[in-house]
Amino acid sequence: MDASVRNEKMSDSEQTFLEDAVSEVLPELPAATKSILIEHLQSIGVETYDDLQFIEEADLMTALRPVQARKLLSIWKRKYQTPENSSSSSSVNASPAQSLSLLSVSPRSSSSSSSTSPGLDTQWDDNFEIPWTKFPDDLMHALERGKRPGPKLRRQMVRIVVTEMVRKCPHVGKKHSTEVAKKMVAKYPKSLQDVIEGDIVGPGYHSLVKQLLNRIENVRRTSTPKIRKRKCQTDDSDLTDEVTLEERAAMQDTYGCINWNVKYLPSEETQESQREKIDNLKRIFQNDDASPEEVKSLMKSTFYTQRQHVNQGKSIKYLRVEWPFWFDELGMSVHFKELTGIDLKETFIRNLDLKGKRLLNYMTTVCVNKSKKFLQTYARLLRIRGQQSGCSDDFKDMVLLLLSYFDEKEESMFFYVEDTCLPEEVQLEQVPLTPAVIVCGQSCYSSTRYMLSLDRNLINTNISSFISALCLMFGSYYCFNIHYPSELASTLEFLQRWREQRESRSREVAHWRDVGVGPLLNRRLLSHADVALGDSVRAGVRSLARSMLIAALIDML
């Protein structure tokens, strides 16, 4: 029995000194990788600081990349190759990080005196701060609302707390666990206190202490063979600190949204207050006495309910009735900013000022010489435009030429009607299902009024400018969870990247960043796909060709 206790203590001490040695050199190493590395070092016989000088690069390659392994070896061999470096007598002149490492010298020699070591803070639990900020959103929501977290959330909470406790003190005992449990229950008694049928059981924190102690024991336990301990990750894995729930949610967001699926109401809001604000927005819209600041405030505070309605699949007709301001420029700009963190129209105009002339110059001087079809489109637009000039017309040129550059159809984005056409006279059965701009006039250049159609419903019948109409159309894809149609995928993706003001390319696009690709090669690729390949491969070739074109055009800016 005594031998097993000694072995367990020795294993705990090995785990601690190896974690310190690795963390000092590679502090940013993920917890899972660090755990695998420590287990591997233990399995090959590393028991003291002095053993680290005998590690070879091949010993570390199972868990680390080459540069990480070399960095670790370089510092370890320089630090532990002489006896003085492992002697506690040199701690007087050592740095704080070195002093911490040298306090334990060797697990074997310090295991018997660790409880009385002058460097060990036995009162650390008095100043220990519960890591509330690291808890998942679901857990904090339950705690703040006085609800009892479910078993899975409670286990996650215990894991996070024990991880922080072990970092603070490698040798956590029952006394420390009890003090930490007291603090947690005192902070959220309704959620964490031991209660049976309304009566507090014992001190109220006994079950939490038990869970903390069990988790600490599990952390200390090792298994054989150690290198095969972690083969897969499950919902109950120990990687809570490595990948937070917020990061996982961000990975699932679409089209670059940062707030796509809002899980909870703001703390100051209730379902009743949301309903009141929705009715207030309707009243303001009907009375035509809207104050822009008031509308912005109401739209922002009801963003949670807006996302709930969209993500539940509510129809456009329903949304149009419930949220009339959402389909106006003011309301959509608020929702788009909350959804993506980016100003919609302001970013388009800013990028037009910065890069519009460069893009137009490239198209009108380079692209016209590469494609006869593009040259014909450019000549047609010059005839339609005539002598008109200005920023708005430059933007029209850019969009229409982009459609031609990517060999996409103008009628998939714009639907032309007479300039005197009334909303009820628009033949919606001929309009695309995806967001489309209704141009009231013979061309985008001569029109002074635009409408917006979505799911063949007119959602805005009085848009005064081309830029506003295009921004509303583009924002609709984001706000209402609509995928880019294949007929406009290249143009819309280019506008998306142009709007984001960053050269964020997929790996597929980055591969072609230095390749100048024009419409002619794009058509050749697509033609080859149609003739020689099956449907799935043809789709892949089309996607590759589109990505090559977008990358080539972005590189011109």
Image: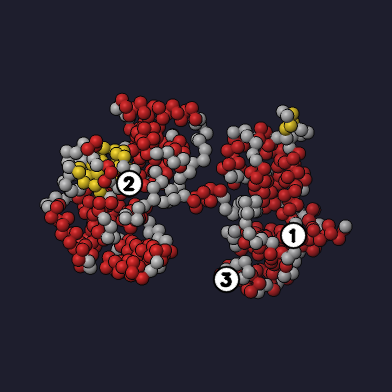
Q: x, y percentage for residue 269?
A: 49, 31
Vertical relation: 526 (above or below) 174? below
Q: x, y percentage for residue 46?
A: 73, 68
Q: Nearer the viewer, mark 2 or mark 1?
A: 2
Residue 433, which numbered label? Answer: 2
In depth, the one of 282 and 486 nearer the eye is 486
Q: Amino acid at mark 2?
A: Leu
Q: Amino acid at mark 3?
A: Pro
The residue wearing badge 1 is 222
Vertical relation: 375 (above or below) 198? below
Pointer 1 or 3: first along the chain: 3
Report how far apart the C-alphas of labels 2 and 1 lie in the structure.
Answer: 60 Å
The residue wearing badge 3 is 66
- The residue positioned 48% from the left and 27% from the top of the image is 272
**Left or right position of 240 against 174:** left
Q: Amino acid at mark 1?
A: Thr
Answer whether labels 2 and 1 touch (C-beta < 8 Å).
no
Q: x, y percentage for residue 532?
A: 36, 71
